[in-house]
Structure formats: C-alpha cells, structure tokens
Image: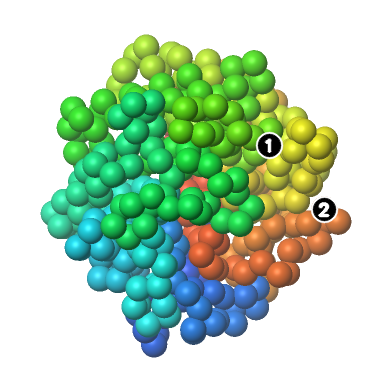
Amino acid sequence: MVKKLSEYAKVLNQELHLILDYWSAVVPDPLYGGFLGQIDNENIPDFKATKGAVLHARILWSFSAGYKHASKPEWLEQANRAYDYLISHFLDREYGGVYWTVNYDGTPLDTKKQVYAVAFAIYGLSEYFMVSGKQEAKEIAIGLFKDLLKYSYDNRAGGFFEAFDRQWQPMDDLRLSEKDANEKKTMNTHLHVLEAFANLYRIWPAEPLKKHIGLLLSNFSSHIIDRKTGHLVLFFDENWNRKSEIISYGHDIEAAWLLLEAAEIITEESRIEEFRVLSLQMASASLTGVDRYGGMYYELDVQHAHLNTEKHWWVQAEAMIGFFNAWQLSHDEQFLSFSLSCWTFVERKLLNKKYGEWYWGIDEHGQVMETHDKAGLWKCPYHNSRACLELIKRIGQVKSAAI
C-alpha cells in the first residue's frame, strides 16, 4: 500500500510541475498584461479575447498554492502577475466587489457583481497572502468578505443571493452561464463562498467569519444536500425551495471533501462529525456517476432520465480528491481504487501530450471535445493543480501515520 501511494504522489508531483510550468510559459499575456483570455488545444492564443475575474483569481490561487508547496521562484512570479492584474483591472474600488470580465486591454467590460467571482477573488487573495505576506492582499480579501455580507447576504432566510449590477442593485439575469437556471440561490455559488471563507479564516480567524462559515455549513446540511439521496440540489428560490432535478456528479464529490475541510478549519467537533457522515454519504452517492473505465460522468437529468456521459477535466480532478478523502474516512478500499482509476483515466484520455495541459473533456463518443478551449473564462489550472497538491499532502499524512 505504501509503495502504491508513494508512486501516486510521485506522478502527481510530476504532473503538478507540468501543469503550472505550462501556465507559466504559455498563458501570460505579453501584450496587454495579466493572462490570455483564450487559448485553443494547439496553444494558439486569441489576444483579443475577453478576460475573466474567475480565471485570474484561480490562476492566483494555483500559483500561490504551488509556490507554497515547491518554492519555485517562477511560480511566485506568476502569482505576483496575477495579483497585480486582478487588483488593477478587476477590483471595483468605487462600489466594492470585482467585475465579471474586462476587455483584452484590461478596460471594464461586464461590471456585474457575480458573487461566485467575488468568492474566488477572496480565495486567491487569501492563498497569495500566505506566500507573499502582502498585507494589502489580506485587507482586500477581508474587504470583499464584508462586501458580500453587506450586499449579498440574505438576513431573512440565510444564504447569499447570486448576482447584482455594478452598484449591487438587483438584476434580471442571475446566471453564471447559459446552461444554468436563473434562480436567486445556487449550490455552486454557496460551495465556493464557503471554500473562500474557509481559506480566508486560515489567515484571519475572526469570529464573524467563523460564524458565517458555520451558517454556510448549516445551509448545506439543511437545504442543499438531499439527505435521502446524498446528492446536491443545484438551484433554489430565495426561500430555499428546490428548483432543480439535476444531479451534478462532479459537484457532489467536490463538496464531499470541501465541506468537511471547512468544518475542520473552524475546529468545531460537532460539525466535523456531522460532515464526516455526510461526506461519506455523498461520496457513496457519487459512485453511480463513475463508469467502468474509471472516468466520472458529467450529470444526470433525473426528470427526463437523461445521463450526460461527457467526462470533463474538473470532474475527474475532484473525483481523485473526493474518493481519496472517502477512503481516509472509511478505509474502504473501493474509494481508493476509484481515486486511482480516475487518475488513470486522466492519463489515458485527458492529457494533451503534444501541446501540454489537460483537454476540457471527452464527449459521449469518447472523443476529445475539440470545440472547448484549453484556457478560457472557465478553463484554468485550479482544479487539476489542486488535485495534485491535495493528494500529495494527503498521501504524506497517510504515510506519516503508518510509520
């Protein structure tokens, strides 16, 4: 077992370097600063592509976390680049929050306040502070946390509303993307607000922040996790009435470890025990989304009995962590086997061995999804680099405990 885990950690460390070295060499924008908004599978850039806050915040997190692990100077240099661009071009110093997108030259484009994007800015800035020590980064992250409490938090029913215009006024279209339901509260945003708040707590363990992490965990246990099935409910109205019958396998397995991690960060034993149980329930429910080749399907539309068998890059990355976490909790070997088989699927099907990085995914016919870019508003190094980093850390803990 120790030998198998050591080999797993070794190959993931190699993959981490390949991922971040790719983003360091190929994705920085040499003309307009920051990082390119779009690159195709053959590394052909679009220098006029729109640039997203989520992409830059996730790049900031990835290089910061990578540098914390490996102390590679060029990774800190790229973290500095992402930080400078994020606060210079996306941060709204007049009204708070961050813009959703900017033009290729850094001028504001879509100035709406999507809470999801604000959350990722907090997440990236918190990680960056850990490696840079820049007090400004910490202060901006705290300021964004306060923006969310002031403008987005629902003081009546709890949780966070989804989106606003630049001045934090209500909007008609709240969606993150065209495929999403236009509802006031979503699982996805709440998961990443929780993730952001938990990372901020590592550098700023303030009582109001701890309180809201606890409230978010309660939102999940009371509303978002379907306690009968172990799956997540994706969309809600303002009163937490269910508005979706879609199962997102990737989010199920991602939440299975992120929720427990948040409970552990605030060190509340009752929460930790509650989410140990829920984590295993969610991981077990997620197993129905894994096919016989090791990859995890995208989603199931329960209402129409339609299974989307595409296998996206981020889903496989989260499955690698989530099933490993389930193995740590249960010692059930099937979970470790699924973590390893998801990585094997990535190696065989998703690694772009000619041009670097991972493909977006594999379609229902087992072919590469060529119409999706390698870098873009949604495609970033966050999920796959984090899978490498998280598993390397966890394998080290397992090996230490075995000595």
Residue found farthest to the right? 365
**Residue 53 image-quadrant placement:** bottom left
Instruction: Please report the residue visible at 59 percent of the width from the left and 78 percent of the height from the top.
Output: 43
Quarter of the picture holding the N terminus = top right
**Left or right: where 248 falls relative to 262:** right
- For residue 202, which quarter of the picture? top left
Which element carries disc 2, helix, strand or loop? loop
Distance between mark 1 and mark 2 Cα atoms: 18 Å
Residue 103, horizontal then vertical, whole percent: 41, 77
In the picture of the structure, the residue carrying the numbered disc 1 is: 246
| Relative vertical location of residue 278 with respect to residue 369 in this rendering, above or below | above
Residue at 20% from the left image edge and 54% from the top image edge:
140
Going from N to C along the chain, the mark reached first, 1 or 2, is: 1
In the current view of this chain or complex, which residue is farthest to the left? 135
- 395 over 99 or under it: above or below: above
Q: Position of residue 226 (x, y in %)?
A: 60, 22
The amino acid at mark 1 is: Ile
| Residue occupying the point 57% across, 42% down | 318
Residue position marked by numbered label 2 in the rendering: 364
Q: Is residue 403 above or below residue 243?
A: above
Q: Residues within 10 Å of mark 1 (few under 14, many from 20)?
A: many
Around disc 2, counting alpha carbons within 10 Å, would you say few (fewer than 14), some (14 to 19), or many (20 or more)? some
Q: Is residue 228 visible?
A: yes
Instruction: Determine the image quadrant of residue 200.
Output: top left
Image coordinates of residue 154 in percent, x first then y, are 34, 33
- The residue that appears at 65% across and 73% down in the rendered structure is 41
Tell me the amino acid under the disc marked 2. Glu
